[in-house]
Image (cartoon, grey):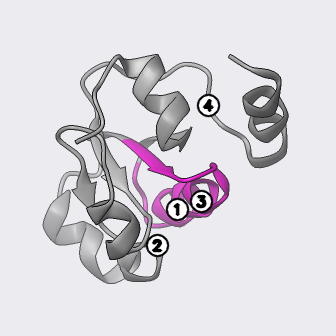
Amino acid sequence: MNIFNRIMGGIVGVDKELPANACLIDVRSPAEYASGYLEGAISIPLGDLIPSIGNAVPNKDTEIIVYCQSGARSAAAKNQLQSMGYQHVSNGGGIGSLAASLQKKIC
């Protein structure tokens, strides 16, 4: 992990331990998602998360990793999901570092 990711992880709370088979949720804008996303990720922009998550992930015990561009929006998404009762939510941080951590390609 490079120094930028360490700093951002400390600032926005990027989780170090990430579940391998979690549901990936990209909380960036539709335009950002269209420019490249992690293979298998679901696009739910941060502003749409609360009204949309129940349809996308109805089971609140599902392992979820949220990510964005840098980790700030995903930190907010993690807090929102936990306040809604989701039990296993991880902040994956930025798309680039998460792709490397999970060994997933960006589509």
Q: Decide: marks 3, 1 in contact (CB < 8 A)?
A: yes
Residue 95, image x, y percentages? 47, 42
Residue type at mark 3? Asn
Residue 42 visible in this rendered orientation of the protein: yes
Q: Is residue 72 left or right of residue 32?
A: right
Task: State the CA–CA distance, disc 2 to disc 1.
Answer: 6 Å
Q: Secondary structure at mark 1?
A: helix
- Residue at the location (31% across, 51% down)? 36
- Residue at the location (31% across, 83% down)? 51
Residue 5, image x, y percentages? 73, 31
Q: Which mark is residue 77?
A: 1
Q: Which mark is residue 79?
A: 3
Q: Is residue 34 left or right of residue 80?
A: left
Task: State the CA–CA distance, disc 2 to disc 3.
Answer: 11 Å
Q: Is residue 51 above or below residue 69?
A: below
Residue type at mark 1? Ala
Residue type at mark 2? Leu
Q: Decide: marks 2, 3 in contact (CB < 8 A)?
A: no
Nearest the viewer among 98 and 32 is: 32
Classify 10 Å Cα crowding around label 4: few (below 14), some (14-19), many (20 and above).
some
Nearest the viewer among 24 and 57 is: 24
Q: Is residue 54 above or below residue 4?
A: below
Question: Where is mark 2, residue-wise?
Answer: 46
Q: Quadrant of residue 15?
A: top right
Q: Does residue 31 belong to the magenta stretch?
A: no
Farthest residue toward the front?
35
Q: Which residues are magenta?
A: 65-86
Foreground disc of the pair 2, 3: 2
Q: Decide: marks 2, 1 in contact (CB < 8 A)?
A: yes
Q: Which mark is residue 15?
A: 4
Q: Quadrant of residue 99?
A: top left
